[in-house]
Image (cartoon, rainbow, N blue to C red):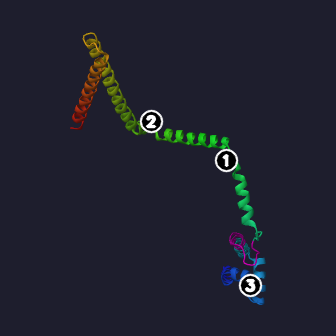
Amino acid sequence: MAEGMTHKSSCERLDASAYLDGELDNAASLYFEEHIRECSSCAVTLAEQRRLLCLLDNAFGSPSEKKLLLPPNFAEVVTARAQSDMSGVRCRSEHRRALLFCAALTFAAFALLGAANLDAMLAPIGGAARIFGSILLMVARFFADAVGSLAVILRAAGGHLPIDPPSLKLFVWTLLASAVILLLRLIGSYHRTRASE
């Protein structure tokens, strides 16, 4: 038991890191080397500290190592190669490939959003399309009704005008067309004022 205590106290006095750093004098270094041959736990401690120092040297590099030297025209060579490698981007096939890639990314984004969110995103577009369709339908009906009404008026009035000179007949038709156009403008302004209220 006393031998174990003296062995433990001698191990505590030894400093493996000081030995590795070369801080021990010759006598202390020789004593440490003899002790390492006899004590397996101190040998393991020394091996672990050596391994740690090797890892640190590999990670951070030692100051005595030479730095990696780059050629003097390194930046120009890299720039020239990067510019020459961009030639594929300028051709049409590359543009098509980029367009397909963007379309695939867009499809994937919509797929990831889910059907519920897609309906919420497309709802304003559908509402705007319905409003635009209603406006177009209203305009088309207005013009169809106007043309139909004008045809009925012209058919009814065409056979009953007892005017013989052609110039007077042309004047009457021009006056009738002007009246119809004025009527259509009045109806349009009436609908606009009703819509703004």
Q: Nearer the viewer, residue 77 or 194?
A: 194
Asked if residue 90 shows in the view, the reply is yes
Q: Residues within 10 Å of mark 2 (few under 14, many from 20)?
A: few
Q: Is residue 18 magenta?
A: no
The reply to whether discs 3 and 2 touch (Cβ–Cβ < 8 Å) is: no
Residue under the image location 69 percent in, 52 percent down: 86
Residue sitting at the far front = 165
Query: Which residue is label 1 attached to?
Result: 90
- Disc assigned to residue 22: 3
Q: Amino acid at mark 1?
A: Arg
**Residue 90 vertical position relative to residue 122 in the rendered view, above or below:** below
Q: CA distance from mark 3 to mark 1?
A: 63 Å
Q: CA distance from mark 3 to mark 2?
A: 71 Å
Q: Residues within 10 Å of mark 1 (few under 14, many from 20)?
A: few
- Disc assigned to residue 115: 2
Q: Secondary structure at mark 1?
A: helix
**Residue 20 vertical position relative to residue 157 in the rendered view, above or below:** below
Q: Secondary structure at mark 3?
A: loop
**Residue 186 vertical position relative to residue 71 in the rendered view, above or below:** above
Q: Which residues are magenta?
A: 52-67
**Is residue 106 shown left or right of residue 4?**
left
**Is residue 103 shown left or right of residue 47?**
left
The reply to whether discs 3 and 1 touch (Cβ–Cβ < 8 Å) is: no
Q: Which tag, 3 or 2, sits closer to the chain's start?
A: 3
